Amino acid sequence: MTEKNKVALITGITGQDGSYLAEFLLSKAYEVHGIMRRASVFNTERIEQIYQDPHQSHRRLFLHYGDLSDASNLNQLIKIIKPDEIYNLGAQSHVKVSFEIPEYTANTDALGTLRLLDAVRGSGVKTKIYQAGSSEMFGQATQMPQTEATAFNPASPYGAAKVFAHHICKIYREGYGMFICNGILFNHESPRRGKTFVTRKITTGIANILSGKQEKIYLGNLEAKRDWGYAPEYVEAMWLMLKQDKPDDYIIATGETHSIREFLDAAFRLVNLNNWEKYIGIDPAYYRPVEVNLLLGDYSKAKKLLDWQPKVKFAELVKIMLEADLKQAGLDNQKFIQHLPNHSRNGAGIK
Ligand code: NAP
Ligand code: GDD
């Protein structure tokens, strides 16, 4: 007798992580349901490639219109889909934008999580839940590196909304015995990263400069440091959390931190443009009212309990993203990309 395929529901399936997670779960023979928002233009670009898959995994992918601000929609979907696992990735995820639309951000990221938990609780469906928490919850961090025990000190409406979501998940876990895991993921990037996040803004900017479409990249604070990992590896960690016997909270990070300046240096060097300052303009519009200066994660709990550790680190991540953007711009990688020294795979960067 064959085991019934597991059923997963992903909020935020059209985003960077949602698209990688959908592919990953389909490769594990899951039936995958995704909630997508209605948009006036196509917003399914990141999941288009599932439809090209020769194994026809799109036959196990189902998309539903919905929104984390709509409780009746969430209640209905949970009752119809009866998922074994829910991955709550849907969010207004841009930190700077959260200062401009704080109420919308709180409604989606904080109350949206609560609505989802209540929909599950009210439905009586037994499901495991992954909550997409963020290193931004540490904000102006009180401890270096940050561990699961570090106090939250958010520095943006986004960070505050995610702290609410984190705590409400813990409260429902403890109060109602629900299986809910909080991932505390540090920044993770990929060729599918939104183009307004700094890494992708730089790599698409370089591709545009090389193809003569753009002269400069306008940025904000170059001194901030982030712990940047590779998104496909991070979605696997989400799945591993739900595989454990007991629900818990885990930090997922690389254990390295690099400044925006270092990212610029590494990326421009790869295409042999060593004097990168002349291609960069500083625009105060990209400064945040409060900045998070330094994030650095300690992933030792995930390593010990989930047997998870990052493989792609800083130098390789920059290369993966840049190569993808050069290719997308129709530029020949062989001509532009410099060969990396062998030690780059596991990060020769400043710790
Ligand atoms: P992303 O690319 O911005 O994707 C966000 C997703 O949420 C999109 O599918 C978006 O839909 C959807 N969404 C936005 N508002 C919604 C609403 N009101 N109702 C339902 N869905 C909504 O983000 P990501 O990088 O994949 O991140 C995934 C999750 O992890 C987010 O919760 C983010 O806050 C969190 N996180 C990300 C990182 C990171 O470095 N990437 C680190 C820590 C935590 P549209 O496509 O229609 O906009
Ligand atoms: N976006 C952006 N655009 N950031 C810039 C720019 C710019 O032009 N110039 C400098 N930065 C700096 C920001 O001030 C910040 O210090 C850093 O680059 C990283 O910014 P983002 O790439 O926007 O990411 P983030 O760290 O604010 O937030 C991302 O990571 C969080 C995890 O810590 C998002 O993915 C969040 O959703 C996620 O939770």
Image (cartoon, grey):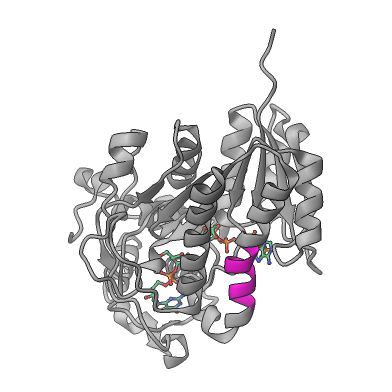
User: Is residue 177 found left or right of 140 in the rendered image?
Assistant: right
Query: Looking at the image, how many numbered discs can be counted on the residues?
Result: 0
In the figure, 274 relative to 90: above or below? Answer: below
Q: Is residue 206 visible?
A: yes
Residue, far top: 1
Residue 38 vs residue 306, the one in the foreground: 306
Question: Residue 190, percent across and down?
Answer: 47, 54
Whether residue 209 can be seen here: no
Magenta residues, start to end? 104-112
Nearest to the observer: residue 322 or residue 4: 4
**Quadrant position of the C terminus in the picture:** bottom left
Q: Is residue 111 magenta?
A: yes
The residue positioned 57% from the left and 67% from the top of the image is 110
Q: Main structural element of the magenta stretch: helix, strand or loop?
A: helix
Q: Quadrant of residue 72?
A: bottom right
At a point 54% along the width and 79% down the height, the residue shown is 98
Residue 267 is situated, as x and y percent measured from the top left of the image, at 34, 64
Whether residue 52 appears in magenta in the rendering, the answer is no
Q: Is residue 29 left or right of residue 286?
A: right
Give percent across and percent down for residue 248: 42, 44
Quadrant for ligand 1 reads: bottom right
- Residue 161 position (above or below residue 190): below
State left or right for residue 72 relative to residue 214.
right
Residue at 56% across, 43% down: 178
Residue 243 in picture, x, y percent from top left: 48, 32
